[in-house]
Image (tube, rainbow, N blue to C red):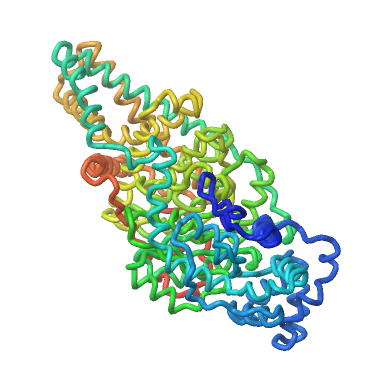
Amino acid sequence: MVGDAGAARKGRSHVSHDAGEDHRDLGRDLLRARDDGAASAPLPASIASALPASELRPYRDHVDADELRAAAARARLVGVGVDEVLVASGVLDDQTATRLLARDLGLSVATPNLASLPDDPAVAEAVLRTGTLVIGTGSGRPRFVMAARGRIVQRLRRALKRDAGLASRVELISPAALARRVGAVCAPSFAAAATGRLVLADPFKSASTLRPGRIVGLAAAAIGLPLALLLALAPEMGLLAVQAALSLVFLAWIALRFAGCIYVPPEEPLPVLDARSLPVYSLLVPLYDEAASVPWLVAALSALDYPPEKLDIKLVVEADDHATRAAITALELPPHMAEVVVAPVGPRTKPKALEAALPFVRGSIVAIYDAEDLPEPDQLRRVVAAFRAGGPKVGCVQARLCIDNGGDSWISAQFAAEYAGQFDVLLPALSALGLPIPLGGTSNHFRRRVLDQVGGWDPYNVTEDADLGIRLARAGWQTRVISSTTFEEAPVTRRAWIGQRTRWLKGWAQTLLVHGRRPRALVRDLGPAGTIALILLSAGPYAAALVHPLCLAFLIADIVRGVAGLPCTRMAEVVTSALTYATLVTGYAGAAATMTVGLGRRGIRPGWWTVASIPFYWLLLSVAAWRAVIELIRRPYHWQKTEHGAARRGGGGGLRSSASAPPRPRPEGAWS
């Protein structure tokens, strides 16, 4: 019954139970109520006008009359049960609300130590999704342990009236207690399932089946041997051919960036959404070694403008990250926030943690935030409006990312300018053209069913965001970029930046190799335009970073030769030099244009040194790119964590230190 109604994921096993028809009907009703609740459909008019007296009765002797009236009014406004309002507002804790409800219904409260909890991840996920555990599947009549809230309580009340003997077979448990117990028992099986889900569903789209060292070796042999032969037989023409091929890719990539500068995204109207129609919204926040960021993070997420009764926030932590777990425990989390502990099974990566935590979410929309994020308060409402305006083919909405500590150092200023070009210029243009979008690592908002359909995150890809964006496009789903912003922290030291960028470039290479190993299928899924865009967006920047020192060396050699009075005399040399100059100049100009336009759209004027030092920034990109090649061969799945919390946020002089810190202001003015 759990599996029948849970249908937790496409292709997962179902569980059937040999019980009487009346009990199967009860289970279907209860589980259907839970599933319907995730869609937040409006209550019938008869209930919208006034809540049933039975819904208020359990709490009359324990809640002040004015508070209860206010809770009832809010329940009608938001479209939830009065018990959900009382818990979300902190008037009652989760356990007390369950105890009062059980007493009113004549039911017992289940012990949190559930002996019959299944270890099968599919069944355990169905228990979480439905809030119902069925015990006893033999010849006897089954018992139910239920985490009943909201409208499902009224269905349970009606079922108890129909069957007087049912009360002896139903126990209540608080939703939080059920989730904690499932997590304690099933965390290893959830992590194991997360590790193998994508590779079992579609092995050719998982980086776990990639052998990057072998591929790089074969590619080097396939390209290097003919190239060496060509250079040996006709060195000038061979060099010209290589330069021409690279220049063609680079110039096409640069042209795409200039095209993005021309496109002006339309103004988005502010969403006007009825609270009753808002869906349940889940946020996953993966944390590792982020103890210092936890207070700020909780304050930032608490500022979101969304009904807490319909907000489901999971702080995802590794089991052995004791410092972060202690920081979470030290805080009194709001009722709509909870910790999800990930077992140390499989790769220790962010996407594995996200995939292992996914069974615990209850929203029809799932978003990802990082520890240092500060989303604009109305972002979730804007995303809901974007999904509704875009129609059923929109599977993902990407918010824009903005670096708010660009004034901390030269590297953070370059990073901020680069992000402005990416998220305020290039991605909106790609979205408007319907081309594949390599998602940012945070502020991605997905339809839950779409995540399930495409296989979720790849635990073995170290840029799971870019990979998931491509898989969404290959499955026919569209991604929209909206103007709502999430403010982020950039690395403030070159060492931290190189470590982060090495991982990014390694992941982009992984993504390109994974999706490019079956080129015919890739072109069939994305079409010619989408495939070309993918190559330009992934291979173009990577190749440019790899050969940038060589291009600079050619330029310096030409300058030295000119100063020494040794000008180019052969046409091949002249053409090669011209291509080098054109590629470098247009590349620098394209970067300067996108950063200037992107920052300008945020009211920021880049300093002259930020623009003039682009060549030096590109040299650092080259260092990271070559490190990424080495890591791709030696440690393809190693996740190098980015240090957070060292920035002076919002241009202020102090470090982030407390949850009471005010929201960071938008960056403004000029960065040097």
Q: Residue at x 46, y 59 (%)?
A: 357
Residue in the foreground of this view, choosing between 73 and 305: 73
Q: Is residue 341 visible?
A: yes
Q: Please tell me whether residue 28 is drawn above or below residue 623 in the rendered image.
A: below
Residue 433 in the image, given as x and y percentages of width and height: 57, 32
Q: Is residue 588 visible?
A: no
| 238 left or right of 501 in image | left
| 131 left or right of 556 in image | right
Q: Please tell me whether residue 155 is drawn above or below residue 395 in the rendered image.
A: below
Q: Residue at x 32, y 53 (%)?
A: 347
| 4 left or right of 531 in image | right
Residue in the foreground of this view, choosing between 168 and 454: 168
What number of labels is visible? 0
Q: Which image quarter holds the N terminus? A: bottom right
Q: Residue at x 49, y 47 (%)?
A: 599
Q: Please tell me whether residue 437 is drawn above or below residue 237 in the rendered image.
A: below
Q: Residue at x 66, y 69 (%)?
A: 149
Where, by quadrant of the figure, is residue 140 drawn? bottom right
Residue 271 in the image, given as x and y percentages of width and height: 70, 53
Residue in the foreground of this view, choosing between 108 and 635: 108
Q: Residue furthest front?
A: 139
Q: Please tell me whether residue 411 is drawn above or below residue 646 in the rendered image.
A: above
Residue 110 in the image, given as x and y percentages of width and height: 56, 77
Residue 535 in the image, given as x and y percentages of width and height: 40, 30
